[in-house]
Image (cartoon, rainbow, N blue to C red):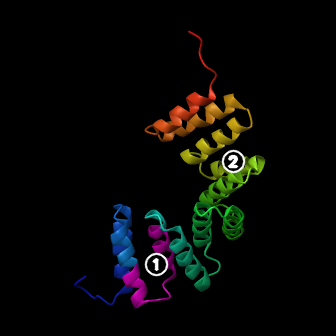
Amino acid sequence: MDIRPDYAEAHFNVGNLFQELGKLDDATNSYRRALAIKPDFVEAHNNLGATLQGVGKPEDAVASYQKALDLKPDYAEAHNNLGVALHDLGKLEDAAASCQKALDLKPDYAEAHYNLGNALKEMGELDDAMASYQKALGLKPDYAEAHYNLGGVLGRQGNVDEAAKQIDLALSYEAEKDSWRINKALLLPPIPY
């Protein structure tokens, strides 16, 4: 960057642009440059965690999110993101606790309800997972992934008709998800010829 190379916010903004373009390695480098200039840049730690997670480094993402939370313990988004990274590492109880902390700070946070639902689903707590997905959908009715995962929980509970309806709703928002169509087909009984 030719203009003010010591301006952390400029590196941060460039990182955000790279992240939006899917250039995660470039985004990671930009966030690291911002943090080299301004080590207490909370949002840069959080966004660095997101890019590290995006390139398959959840352990490093956890460290970045934790640095953000050390600097700003009431940062709901970092608690939620930490929960996602912990989920990816298979630390489901810690993931659920982190998402719940995000919700304690920001009760209307649809993504945190969704991510809590994911952890609870993996822990086998299907009723609680369903409640989390429903809360996410109450806040964000067009949340395709929440409809899909709610459908998955309903299917696991044997409620095939409602599961299919939720997957149809998910597909109405994300029509290109062929894997969702396949999973819906697997829910339904075979059609005799």
Q: Nearer the viewer, residue 121 or 35?
A: 121
| For residue 152, above or below residue 160 | below
The location of residue 134, given as percent across then percent down, is 69, 47
User: For the residue marked with disc 2, what is the amino acid?
Assistant: Gln
Amino acid, disc 1: Ala
Q: In which quadrant will I find the N terminus?
A: bottom left
In this figure, what is the number of numbered marks? Answer: 2
Residue 101, position as x, y percentages in the image = 70, 69
Q: Is residue 132 left or right of residue 141?
A: right
The label shown at residue 116 is none
Q: Which residues are magenta?
A: 32-52
Q: Secondary structure at mark 1?
A: helix
Question: Which quadrant of the rendered structure holds the C terminus?
Answer: top right
Residue 156 on image: x %, y %: 70, 38
The secondary structure that most of the magenta stretch takes on is helix
Q: Earlier in the sequence, mark 2 or mark 1?
A: 1
Mark 1 closeness class: few <14, some 14–19, many ≥20 residues within 10 Å: many
Residue under numbered circle 2: 134
2 lies above or below 50 = below
Residue at the image point whose x is 65% and y is 43% from the top: 150
Is residue 86 in sight in this rendering? Answer: yes
Q: Residues within 10 Å of mark 2 (few under 14, many from 20)?
A: many
Which residue is identified by label 1? 44
Query: In the displayed structure, does residue 88 sit left or right of residue 104?
Result: left
Q: Secondary structure at mark 2?
A: helix
Left or right of 162? Residue 30 is left
Q: Quadrant of residue 71?
A: bottom right
